[in-house]
Image: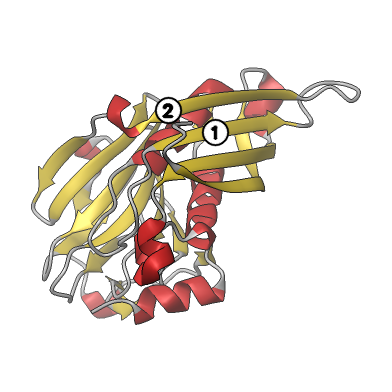
Amino acid sequence: MNPGLDVIELRGIRADCIVGVYPEERSEPQPLEIDLSLGLDTRGAASGGGLEATVDYARLTGEVRFLVGACRFRLLETAAEALARYVLAPPTGDVPRARVEEVTVRLAKPHALPGDAVASLRIHRTAAEYAYEVEKNAFGEVDVIHETPGCGIYRLRVAPGRSIPTHVHEEMDEWELVLGPRLLLQGRPVAPGDAFHWPKGLPHRYDNPLSIEQTILCVDRPAFIPSDERLVDVPLESLRSIEPVSFYRRAAAEHAREGSP
């Protein structure tokens, strides 16, 4: 880590994940232990800048747990690279924070080997190493965070006043974690940190009523297939709600809402 950077450490994040190449590892999730060391400049936060001048580690921990649970990886190396790319991605306007310049990711599979042996991997990456593809879309922009044939991680940036129109998927499994503070899902308000798994064939849509863009963290398995996003004409009042799974602590979600315009 660059000695000129401050370091925030998150130790012992635990989540269940499909990771491995052997048949028993492809069928059932196994525990994954995650440690992160974030290199950044925290002087703005120390002088009164608040959470927007550092990293809200309660939110980041939830986002990491969401990604690990929603994705499927064959190798620890792929999982570590995906998490590094997400942590080092530039912040968005609806979720202001300090830019993370370097990250060390350590992953361990405590149940992968017999006895007391533990398989682990540690990588170190810098923001300068990465460039992110940005795709233009009718609703705004899509940041391509990480893609392999089997899994894609995307950040959907819904422009002010725009919508992700009602659509269905027939081939992809899709998980989405709401990051924005005032998004509407199926025409109703949804809380930051709420995650949804969309069954194939279930129509869903998002609307952004704010004057700033709002973001959604999306995982597609396999990686996004453009032809599998099929628009459907369903009345807003007929769209079905599904129960979310929250990945933020209540305080983190409330702060995200209170800090919005």
Choose top left, top right, bottom left or bottom right for residue 177.
bottom left
Q: Which residue is mark 1?
A: 105
- 188 or 119: nearer the viewer: 119
Q: Which numbered disc covers residue 236?
A: none
The crowding category of the residue bearing disc 2, from other C-alpha atoms within 10 Å (few below 14, some 14 to 19, many at least 20), is some
The crowding category of the residue bearing disc 1, from other C-alpha atoms within 10 Å (few below 14, some 14 to 19, many at least 20), is many
- 5 or 229: nearer the viewer: 5
Choose top left, top right, bottom left or bottom right for residue 260.
bottom left
Farthest residue, direction right: 115
Above/below status of 152 relative to 256: above
Q: Amino acid at mark 2?
A: Arg
Q: Position of residue 135 (x, y in %)?
A: 14, 40
Gap in angstroms between the C-alphas marked 2 and 1? 8 Å
- 236 or 162: nearer the viewer: 162
Secondary structure found at label 1: strand
Q: Amino acid at mark 1?
A: Val
Q: Which residue is mark 2?
A: 125
- 21 on left or right of 251: right
